[in-house]
Image (spheres, helix red, strand yellow):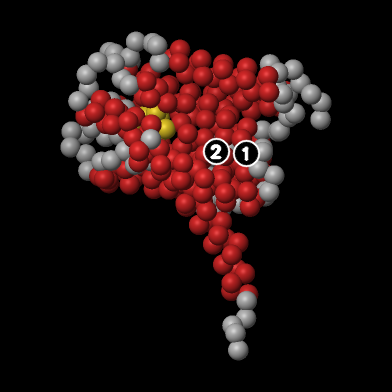
Amino acid sequence: MSHHPFTSVSKSNQRLIQLLILSHLLWSCAVFGLWSIGSLFETPSSWLSAGFLVLQLYAAAQLLLPALLLHPEKRSRGFYLFWGMTLMLSVWLINQLPSSGIWQPLLAGVKSGLLLLVATLIGAALARYVRRLWEIAPICIVMSLADFASWSFGPTASFTREIEQFYLAPKGPPPLIDMVLVKLALPGPGGLAPVFGISDWIMVVFFAIVARHHQVNDNLLGPSGENLADQGRIGRYLPVSVAALFLATLLAQTTGLFIPALPLIALIMFLWYAVRYLLPVTRLTPPPK
């Protein structure tokens, strides 16, 4: 495989990245449209809120299909540094735009689409370094412990208090951490609400692409995501990691607490792989005499 300059990508990956950009922009517009519909409900039920979450996360799952076809290329540290800084700068710049007035929900949707796009590219880059499937086990354990500790008494704890206080009683500019929170449309008179962070979607993409690299079908609705992407079919892809994120966000919405999603996602993925690979072995083991 030839080595490319740190600012370029192959033509096939260029087309896939362009498709990713376009599809994320369309998703952002769809979120804005869903917000417009949801603003008509003054007292929405919890079931309606759950339905809004299902629609947006299910649509976001289809955005992963082009990423499953990205071809790994030999890269230098300069490549990751350049594009990492470019993506971070793009997130910072879009958050400097005025966020008041009638266009605020549309801008919030575009920001969320950009965060999902950035997270998808980061997750895809991280997934290529998992050489063996069993390596996700220590990743899940370390990730869960680190995020839970940060949420309990680390920096995430203070960030959570700031975000919770700001959205319960908005006053002044939003906290800095608000820039990396993905906001979705929920029924009600309010605007888009923060549902999960960019790191949560990074790991969703990471698990989905690791499954693709190791020829594991993690699609809960049928054929593997890679096959669906090759055939250009959308609407039938729901990886386990997206379902895990939905359960985590649903738990946070029903309890009204900013519960970290990463530990729950990691736990569900760990249990899913354990059941998938250990349960058949257990069934084949003859009972002791």
SS class, disc 1:
helix
Horizontally, residue 47 falls left or right of residue 110, namely: left
Q: Answer few, some or many: residues within 10 Å of disc 1's Cα (few below 14, many 20 plus, some between 14 and 19).
A: many
Q: Amino acid at mark 2?
A: Val
Residue in view at x 52 percent, y 27 percent: 117
- The answer to whether marks 2 and 1 mark residues whose Cβ atoms lie closer than 8 Å is yes
For the point 52% across and 53% down, the residue is 270
Q: Secondary structure at mark 2?
A: helix
Which residue is denoted by mark 2 in the rendering? 205
Q: Give the image quarter of residue 234.
A: top right
Which of the 4 image quadrants contains residue 167?
top left
The residue closer to the viewer here, 245 or 285, is 285
Residue 94 in view, yes or no: yes
Above or below, 281 relative to 64: below
Question: Foreground residue, 212 or 262?
Answer: 262
Alpha carbon distance from label 2 to label 1: 8 Å
Which amino acid type is marked by label 1? Answer: Ala
Q: Residue at x 73, y 29 (%)?
A: 73
- Work out whether 106 lies above or below 203: above
Disc 1 target residue: 127
Percent position of residue 194, x then y: 34, 31
The vertical placement of 36 against 153, above or below, is above
